[in-house]
Image: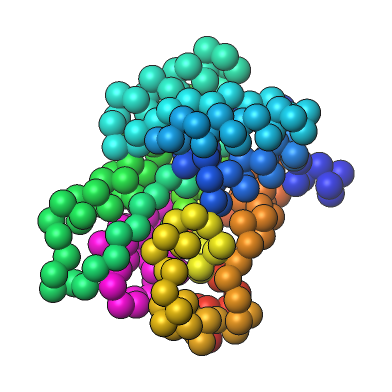
């Protein structure tokens, strides 16, 4: 009975940003726990690769291109998932961008891109999925926030703002959807060994800044996010909502 609390058998999940990094790890982990997974990503090739890995391991998945900043695309994909599987039980908002730059010189177009993908895109997905889950009177939404939603560090002004917004967005949706038996939570990772981190934190000085402040003394591995995601997606967390779970090697505690 205890192990069943952590199983996702028979559940359907939509993972945005599922083509790489933490989204790919969560997609594969959910499939291994028994879920059927819709892998959505702005890069369809990456989404197909993730879905192929799942199917090769005996799981059920399909891939779709999705631009989370376009509300109509989000709604169309959810309708397609419902036609295919009949319900949407889990949403993971992992789609995200990072563009570094100092606060005083940050470009307007870069600000619009980061807020658009990380915050507005998360809102669109929460809203569309939340409507369906409220009608079903069950569901789980997991947003990917960041330690940057709680603390600040140099060169990431838009990213910090967007992830702080995701933390509050999570709480807002949690409060409004709780009467419908829908739990909304977030995960706040530190630096993980993902393509986005490699592209934005490749310089030794930046990496050292974070390692010096991380008690674990290292970056996370993508597979180390899976346990937290399954916990928040499974029945074992039915009384947990509005919470942001740090998976950060102790960064926020130091």
The residue sitting at 61% across, 46% down in the picture is 26
Asked if residue 132 lies left or right of residue 215, the reply is left
Please state, as top left, top right, bottom left or bottom right, where the N terminus lies in the image: top right
Q: Is residue 217 above or below residue 42?
A: below
Q: Nearer the viewer, residue 223 or 34?
A: 223
Asked if residue 199 can be seen in this view, the reply is: yes
The quarter of the displayed image where residue 128 is located: top left
Residue 178 inside the magenta-drawn segment: no
Q: Nearer the viewer, residue 100 or 92?
A: 100
Q: Is residue 51 above or below residue 240?
A: above
Asked if residue 110 lies left or right of residue 122, the reply is left
Q: Residue farthest to the front?
A: 203
Residue 110 lies, in percent from the top left, at: 21, 55
The residue sitting at 13% across, 73% down in the picture is 104
Q: Is residue 74 above or below residue 214?
A: above
Residue 36 lies, in percent from the top left, at: 66, 28
Q: Magenta-highlighted stretch: main secondary structure? A: helix
The residue sitting at 28% across, 53% down in the picture is 114
The magenta-colored residue range is 146-174
Residue 192 lies, in percent from the top left, at: 55, 64
Asked if residue 172 lies left or right of residue 61, the reply is left
Asked if residue 133 can be seen in this view, the reply is: no
């Amino acid at each position: 009975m205890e192990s069943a609390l952590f199983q996702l058998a028979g559940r359907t999940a939509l993972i945005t940003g599922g083509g790489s990094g933490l989204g790919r790890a969560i997609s594969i982990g959910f499939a291994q726990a028994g879920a059927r997974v819709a892998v959505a990503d702005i890069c369809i090739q990456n989404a197909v690769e993730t879905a192929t890995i799942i199917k090769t391991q005996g799981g059920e998945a399909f891939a779709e291109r999705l631009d989370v900043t376009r509300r109509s695309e989000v709604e169309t994909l959810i309708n397609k998932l419902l036609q295919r599987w009949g319900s949407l039980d889990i949403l993971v908002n992992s789609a995200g961008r990072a563009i570094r730059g100092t606060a005083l010189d940050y470009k307007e177009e870069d600000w619009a891109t980061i807020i658009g993908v990380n915050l507005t895109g998360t809102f669109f997905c929460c809203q569309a999925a939340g409507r369906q889950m409220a009608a079903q009177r069950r569901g789980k939404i997991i947003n990917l926030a960041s330690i940057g939603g709680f603390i600040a560090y140099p060169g990431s002004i838009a990213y910090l703002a967007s992830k702080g917004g995701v933390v509050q967005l999570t709480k807002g949706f949690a409060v409004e959807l709780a009467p419908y038996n829908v739990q909304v939570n977030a995960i706040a990772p530190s630096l993980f060994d993902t393509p986005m981190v490699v592209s934005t934190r490749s310089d030794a000085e930046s990496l050292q800044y974070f390692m010096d402040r991380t008690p674990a003394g290292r970056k996370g591995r993508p597979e180390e996010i899976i346990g937290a995601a399954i916990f928040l997606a499974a029945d074992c967390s039915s009384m947990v909502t509005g919470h942001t779970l740090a998976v950060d090697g102790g960064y926020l505690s130091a």
